[in-house]
Image (cartoon, coloured by chain):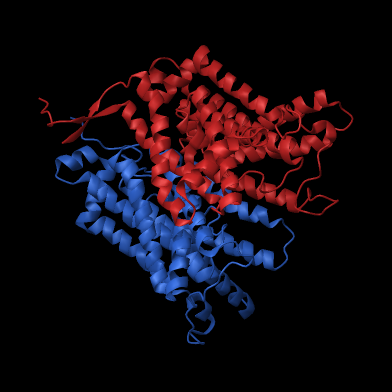
Amino acid sequence: MNQALIATIIVLLAATLRVSTPLLFAALGETLSERAGVLNLGIEGTMFLGAMAGFVTAYWTGSLWLGVAGAVLAGILAGLLMGLLTVILGVDQHVSGIGVTLLTGGLALYLFRLLFGEQRVPPQIEPFPQLSLGNALGLLTPLFEQYSLTYLGLLLVPLLWWLLNRTNFGLNVRAVGENPEAADVAGVNVFRTRLIALALGGGLMALGGAFLSLAQLGAFTFGIIAGRGWVAIALVIFGNWSPWKVLAGALLFGGFQALQLRLQAAGFQLPYQALLALPYLVTIAALALAGRNANYPAALLKPYRREA
Amino acid sequence: MLRLERWEAPPWVKVLIPLTAVAVTLILVAGLVLLSGAGLAETYYFFFLKPLSSRTSLIEVLVKSTPLLLTGAGVAFAFYAGYWNIGAEGQLYAGAVAAAWLGVVLKGLPAVAVIPLILLGAALAGGLWALPPAWLKTRLGVDEVVTTLLLNSVMLFFVSALLNGPWRDPVTSWPQSPTLLETAQFPRILARSRLHLGFLVALAALVFFWWITGRSSFGLKMRAVGQGKEAARFMGVHVDAVVFKVALISGAIAGLAGAGEVSGIHYHLIEAISPGYGYSGIVVATLGSLHPLGVGLAGAFLGLIATGSQTASRALSVPTYLGDVIQAALLLTTLAMLLLRRYRIRWGRMVETP
């Protein structure tokens, strides 16, 4: 192979990692929530709120990392709201989730408009830089010149796997997601475990949104999430609720997106919307293939009540 | 201590629930209103009373509620049968695409022929767009929530591709479809207003919903499937067939909402034809307790909020997004309050059960 082609592929892979990052954060957060038995459709709005909260915090404090913290905090609150509805009150998870998405979305828009008014050009911040490696790794260098948040996301994959499979908390999460009655009898606090999973999950989703405003754009725009939350929901099913497979799905989806951007930049003569829609259709096809074999957590969508 | 006790709520509680939810929502949102620097009383006045004070604005409320009534009815129809159609937004756009196409190609026909064809085409398009998730659900057991959601995005990309490609208006070269034929434009049903045929279509959809759920054997089957698929199957209901028909009808009703916006308001298709009416339909359906009359009232109320948010924004510079917040908060408080239909709160000692 000639060097130019290899270089192009490397650049494409580097872009794939970048594009996958927000999806990865969000899908890992959703994985945690669903393993505890709660489908959090508040994901799209939580990401949006995270993007807003992260941006505003960074804008005010001048610190991008405080922005990250602000976003995570907002996401935790959104996750707890979801928990209040679905865990404590035990109301329908589908409708609650859509409600949380609508509420956090509306809230982010309202607060942002209050804070910044109507501006023709959205306010900007200096975003996270991509790591600069000079030419340390030769041809491979671009692949590793990523945002630090991308590395954080990749690091979270084994971390979440370890949390779920090797810790007491993870055991509890899986127990309340599979059989809350049995878990309760065994002395696990079902409500608390689910609330913590939702709070942490919400924080991760918001971090995914904040990646877009703090690293990729350096601004907060109203179309910033553009359905990525819904994609993350699909990635979790596609990834069979396992962090590693979720990573694989996110990279696959990100790869599609990166390729599409690349083809568009190269002036490819296909309506780019077709390429944008393609990953969604591929996801649906993947869901169809997984079909009944999908290993849904057994207690997903089921509220738990201690009936007297 | 407080405890919950199972009960079957008497009718007055069921009526009181949405009303209390509205009151609780207004209290919860108060802090956000004050944050804008506007007074609470005047904001709520501009939101909820001012739009009702003149003929023009009152009619505008009905105009705004037209798509909400349709998406609300469509969503409620599906939810009633336990089918979680979250795809009303995409189905609305499918209907809008059909209306924008038929409204341009049906040349040489009188309006009495064109308009029914547009309604039929939009309903068909919305219904067809709702079918793949139903097929995947019944044949392969794929969760319809995810597929209907994903198809919303796909439809939006499709509309964007159409408007920036083959359908770009040759006259203005804006990303909008060519203007509809005059014979394809819905007649106004009130003089000096924007209220159009679509409003009557919405009322008809509610009557249809009432008739199906309250007066037909199919309604009984829907109810059975909604309450439990296994039990319904045991009773001899062909569950898959019910799910298919429900998805088709639900999508068709949502598709009509798209026709109303294209043929009744804009006279062409634009990308921003719906500011999320499909998702608001979930609010309308829930707030209306999946009951036709409730959906009607909830749709009108959300139309009021949509109008009021603009009135308040003009008068007090409260961002219009407050309307979105109120709408969403209302959904969540209603959802929480609905528990009171099945549980009542008792003050007393926990009773040990043997």
On the image, the x and y values in percent for residue B335 come to: 39, 36
Quarter of the image for residue B26 reads: top left
Residue A48 position (above or below residue B22): below
Please name the color used to draw chain B. Answer: red
Quarter of the image for residue A62 reads: bottom left
> Looking at the figure, which quarter contains the N terminus of chain A?
bottom right
Quarter of the image for residue B309 reads: top right
Asked if residue B111 shows in the view, the reply is: yes
Most foreground residue, B163 or B221: B163
Please name the color used to draw chain A. Answer: blue
Q: Residue at x 40, y 51 (%)?
A: B31
Residue B207 position (above or below residue B258): above
Relative to A26, B179 lies left or right: right
Most foreground residue, B268 or B220: B268
> Looking at the figure, which quarter contains the C terminus of chain A?
top left
Relative to A36, A137 lies left or right: right
